[in-house]
Image (spheres, helix red, strand yellow):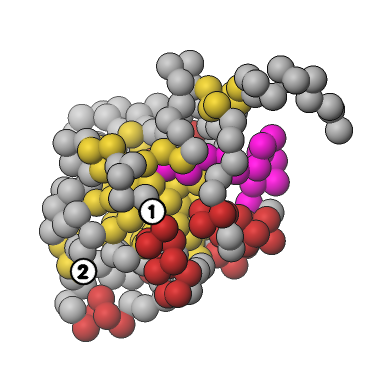
Amino acid sequence: MEEYRISDAPASMFYIHDFITEEEERLVQQSIPANRWISLSHRRLQAVPTRLTATNTLLASPLPPWLTEPIINRFNDLSIFEGASHGVNHCLINEYPPGQGIMPHEDGGAYHPIVATVSLTGSLVLDVTAKVGSLVLDEDAVDGDRGQQVVPKSWRIFQEPRSLLVTMGAAYSDTLHGIADVTRDVDLNEHTVANWDLLGDKRVIEANGGRSERITRISLTYRDVRKVSVVGSNLFGKVRT
Ligand SMILES: O=C(O)CCC(=O)C(=O)O
Ligand SMILES: [Fe+2]
């Protein structure tokens, strides 16, 4: 994994371009059920196998093969979810048309603190910002005139279609992430994009003057929900193995 580390981002974020092939991308896209979308004011989403309960509990059932093969095998090869007690048991699918994003937020304690995001179809910038009071504040950015005011440090991660972004550690717990509501990402270059050196195809961006037009992007965010209910599985005296 070390070769994929985004060195100019909080520990630890990793970026792998072309994590899946175009054929695999097409297969996943075609398998997303058309009738299971939940529409929000901006994006729409699907939670697989289901949404969490009010107490952030997952009613256990396996992920469908189109979400697990070959992606989970590749996670295993890289030992991404090695420390997670269930491995991967949940996947949130988000779809963002151009001009639509997601407010800065953190994913929180319902999950083991690792998220693995596979992007499909479109590129965009994920904005990562240090939480105020966290350890990853930018000490160089203290405003001299106003004394102790501290400016949260931020990073831009460019996510290409078919790429994988892994977020864990302080990057998971001490930052917020969001996606701007824009129709194009601008000012993309080696100084502004934290994972510039890890991109699969920066020539397209360079040829376009540092701009990237948004087209609809789908993301698959794989996680391990900590609390799992196995209601039903003991009813008939499930044998422990
Ligand atoms: O689409 C993404 O890459 C981010 C999605 C996200 O932040 C979330 O589902 O919690
Ligand atoms: Fe999130």
Residue reaching furthest right? Answer: 241
Nearest the eye: 207 or 151: 207
Nearest the eye: 189 or 102: 102
Nearest the eye: 143 or 80: 80
Q: Quadrant of residue 149?
A: top left
| Screen quadrant of the C terminus | top right
- Secondary structure mostly seen in the magenta stretch: loop
| 124 left or right, relative to 12 | left
Residue type beneath disc 1: Ile
Expressed as whole percent of the image width and height from the top left, the position of residue 100 reads: 18, 48
Expressed as whole percent of the image width and height from the top left, the position of residue 56 reads: 48, 22
Disc 2 target residue: 212
Disc 1 target residue: 32
Q: Quadrant of residue 236?
A: top right
Q: Which residue is painted at 55% across and 64% down in the image? A: 4
Q: Residues within 10 Å of mark 1 (few under 14, many from 20)?
A: some
Q: CA distance from mark 2 to mark 1?
A: 26 Å
Q: Secondary structure at mark 1?
A: loop
| Screen quadrant of the N terminus | bottom right
Residue reaching furthest front? Answer: 236
Residue 87 part of the magenta segment: yes
Residue 171 part of the magenta segment: no
Q: Earlier in the sequence, mark 2 or mark 1?
A: 1
Q: Residues within 10 Å of mark 2 (few under 14, many from 20)?
A: many
